[in-house]
Amino acid sequence: MASRHLAFAALVVDAVVLLLLGGSLPAFALAFRVPQDVAGLIFTANGLGFLVAVPACGVLGDRFGKRAVVGVSALGLAVGLLALAASRDLAAGLCAAALIGAASGSVESGITAVLPELYPGREGFANNYAQAFFGVGATAGPLLLLVPGLGWRERLVLCGSAFVVLGAAFWLERRRDRRVPGSDWRSGIAESLAVPGIGASLLAMVLYTGVEVAVWGWLFAVVTRPGGAGPVWAVAELSGFWAAMGGGRFLAGALADRIELPALIAAGTALGVPALVLALLLPSRVGALAAVVVCGLAFSGLWPSLVANGQRRHGQSAFVSALLVGAGGGGSLVVPAAFGFATARLGLPAATAGLALLLAPVALLPRLARAARGSPASAAS
């Protein structure tokens, strides 16, 4: 029970951090005395740290224990947040952001790897239920941007302090870890990479996560563009999106115990494609807000169910979970940047159509993943 509560709490705070970083870009630019596009390199550094560290921590999780690695990663995340809060120039901020990305990704992938142990045979429920708490944090994150008298440095210090406590608690839980003995963890990695269809699972994670991050990452800018609504309305849409994501994941978790995961993914994608188009293009504020909420509901079960399907099909090692989460991180680094580039040069309608085209294959890719030998899916087939 302690591991479950720690996992849920860590996902809440991790989501708060993610949304606070996104909403603090103007403050970073002002504090570091650079233009906003240059300050945006903080997000690039964050993403690169994520991509480098997550697979490595997956290997370490199999070798030394999943909870132990999550504990160390959480403490590293605390150091990164406190370092960013203390940064006085962009160079220091970039170093801190890279550490934040590396540690945050390792915390999330480590928790994702622990979940099948906490809910045996219920990967779909476990991932959706846990990620609902991420949605709670992501809903609260934008609201903190409106609290008067609380600057970006103070917000980061509060989050860093929370991760000190969480990291220490996870470290104390490390006795519950199931470590892979001897050289078996190396052969386990090789077997995971050799499973047919793992490329389809990873590609689905790249495409979906990239599209999702592009939608909520650019939503504030889309809503507040010239002729659009103001920042308060943008915060309402962001919080509405994440509230729908959080609530929808409780529903998706219940459905994951009743229908097969590829069908759940296909249904969410079918609803998500038109919803994201309407969310980004509807001129009506009320209509756009409604579309954003529907988009959040449609997207809510996709990331957790894609991860759960990958764990069921390709094994439940920390390395497999790290590959799946890391693939999503790669998509979030590339797709939002491409969307911004396309919006500036081709216009918002064309860029939005591109996002919809990227999301569509996600409905089919999970069907291409074959079950790993000895996995529950393999036994069922």
Image (cartoon, rainbow, N blue to C red):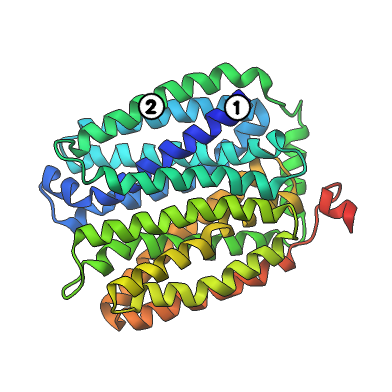
Residue 79 in the image: x percent, y percent?
35, 27
Q: Quadrant of residue 64?
A: top right
* Residue 129 visible: yes
Residue 307 in the image: x percent, y percent?
63, 52
In the rendered image, which residue does mark 2 sit on? 162
Query: Quick check: 103 above or below 288?
Result: above
Residue 75, labelled with which disc?
none
Query: Quick check: 107 above or below 201?
Result: above
Pointer 2 local density, CA inside 10 Å: few below 14, some 14–19, many at least 20: some
Toward the viewer: 181 or 12?
12
Which residue: 89% across, 59% down?
381
Measure the alpha-carbon separation of dots 1 and 2: 16 Å
Residue 37 in the image: x percent, y percent?
21, 59
- With 243 as the anchor, is 23 left or right in this view? left
Question: Amino acid type of disc 1?
Answer: Ser
Residue 180 in the image: x percent, y percent?
74, 29
In the rendered image, which residue does mark 1 sit on? 3
SS under mark 2:
helix
The earlier-in-sequence mark between 1 and 2 is 1
